[in-house]
Amino acid sequence: MIRMFHVFKTFPNKVSALWDISIHIKKGEFVFLIGPTGAGKTTFLKLIYRGILPSKGQVIVDGVNLSRLKQSYVPFLRREIGVVFQDFKLLYDRNVFENVAFSLRVTGVKNAIIKKEVNEILNIIGLSHKKNTNPHLLSGGEQQKLCIARAVVSRPLILLTDEPTGNLDPDTSWEIMKLLFKINIWGTTVIMASHDKLMVDRAQKRVIRLEQGRLVSDTMKGVYSKE
Amino acid sequence: MIRNLFFYIREAFFSTKKNGIISLATIVCLTATLIIVGIFLIISLNINIFIANLESQLIAVAYLTDDLSQDEIEKLVQNTGGLEGVKGVDYVSKEEALQRLKEDLTEHKEILAGIQENPLPSSLEITVYDSNYLEEASYQISQFKGIEEVNYGGQLTKNLLIVFEFIRKAGLGIILVLLFVSILIMFAVIKISVHSRQEEIEIMALVGATNWFIRWPFIIEGFFKGLISSLLAFAVLGKAYQYFSGQAKEIIPFISINLEVDFALRIGIILLFLGIFIGVFGSMLSLRRISYEKL
Ligand SMILES: Nc1ncnc2c1ncn2[C@@H]1O[C@H](COP(=O)(O)OP(=O)(O)OP(=O)(O)O)[C@@H](O)[C@H]1O
Ligand SMILES: [Mg+2]
């Protein structure tokens, strides 16, 4: 589903965020992307949804080489990829329902279908009762859930989540984890960037570790700590 | 498509409401500009009418002696028409001349009461292509046999034409400058509105909105702002024009100020078109360079 071949990313300010990354993530996998702050996790995710292009090397998503993808096709790639951003990126001028509906509206889905799909996903996520609430009135955990709802409402092939359990208590974190597992079981490939040792150790999934932009380990059923 | 249109319109209104002050400022600015453009338009269209009137006075009238035969008159018409710069020649018979005089004097019929024989001469009315030909042509005609006298409009008409032509050109120049300025204003204001929604635009792009999907609400916003502004400008101008033209008529009664419906309609359509053009064009311009991918 996702392949990277010798990917380098150097920002215009000469910061080298990723260095010679090659990786293969299969369809339906659940992968943790871990590493200390500044290791390049967010950069790694941006490469996948074509928020940025690699300086060198190839990124291939669902068989498409992103460096060769025409600008006008980028929106259609992004419709296949749900993203939960580290900084949420919620729209604080509209309610929970509209935030989730937003990602369907931009693709021109019928109103009746939007209503059905959004209500369904809010039910699964457990935010139905807050449907008409403004996002800034939600707790941190609820905002995370809302972000997940928005990312998966269009049933993407890939879900990228950037530290979805950062700053949450262990119980809420585990609740979020269970949600992500559920989405993964539907067939969605999930990549989760995380610092959360507790969750990574408990989940027993594939763990890719970055350090200063380099891929230092890639283990099945891995744990957070080095050795 | 229709579904999207509703979404665009809703988003446009949403954004107009959210950026209330900026929206208001835009509409006020645009209305003011359109009013000024409208004033110049009115002046310049009135001058056009004036010039047309004056140009129609660019005729020479050659009075004929009473003893000419039909053949001689025809010959005179032909010869006059052959002169350089002459556009047309109209023969006005004695009877026609009298008829005209009667029409002009409907309010003072008593003047004609005592007249038994038609005292008016027949004449040729000669129009020319350009006022410069008037003098020479008049001289040539006066040399023809059977011509009693030739009269033509004087230097005053010529000078007035030059002045009005100048005012008209200056007015056009001012309109163009104002148009340019108002597009810049629209551009800046929509840029602010785009800027204040940068985050939203970014999110749209991230969840897979195409560039056009992102642009349409802004373009529609520009469209409606242009529409509203031009309607406002038209209303204000209409009232002011009515008032001032009434005043002007009292002060200088011979000025024929145009108050007709189709004149107002023409101004209205021009303003509407301009307002919408400025609104939409300003939006497009400010959207051209926003980055949909900036993260
Ligand atoms: N747009 C950018 N321009 C310049 N440098 C950048 C940019 N984005 C990221 N970097 C740099 O690239 C490096 C990797 O950043 P990245 O955000 O990928 O780290 P991270 O692993 O997500 O960190 P964290 O755990 O704190 O979120 C950092 O040194 C960062 O300063
Ligand atoms: Mg990060």
Image (spheres, rainbow, N blue to C red):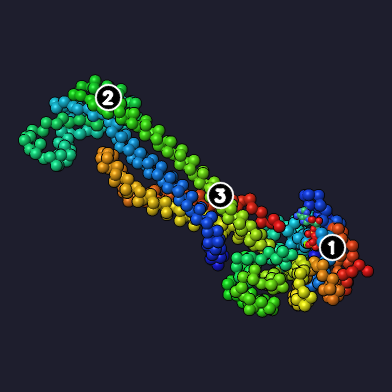
Q: How far apart are labels 1 and 2 at the CA level? A: 100 Å
Q: Residue at x 45, y 51 (%)?
A: B31
Decide if residue A35 is on the left or right side of residue A50.
right
Chain bearing tag 2 is B
Q: Chain of mark 3?
A: B
- Badge 2 is on which residue? B138
Viewport quadrant of the N terminus of chain A: bottom right
Classify mark 2: helix, strand or loop.
Answer: helix
CA neighbours of label 1 inside 10 A, class few (<14), some (14 to 19), many (20+):
few
Which amino acid, by three-letter code, is at mark 1?
Pro
Q: Chain of mark 1?
A: A
Give the Cα separation between the discs numbered 3 and 1: 45 Å
Q: Secondary structure at mark 3?
A: helix
Marks 2 and 3 belong to one chain: yes
Furthest toward the top, the residue is: B143
Quick check: can you spot residue B272? no
Disc 1 and disc 2 in contact, CB within 8 angstroms: no
Q: Secondary structure at mark 1?
A: loop
Q: Amino acid at mark 2?
A: Ser
Q: Which residue is mark 3?
A: B187
**Rendered-image quadrant of the C terminus of chain A:** bottom right
Taking the spot 61% from the left edge, 58% from the top edge, the residue there is B197
Kindly indicate whether the residues beneath marks 1 and 2 are on one polypeptide chain: no
Of the four image quadrants, the one with ligand 1 is bottom right
Q: Which residue is mark 1?
A: A36
Q: Ligand 1 near label 1 (Cβ, under 8 Å)? A: yes
Q: Is residue A163 left or right of residue B121?
A: right
Q: Residues within 10 Å of mark 3 (few under 14, many from 20)?
A: many
The number of discs equals: 3
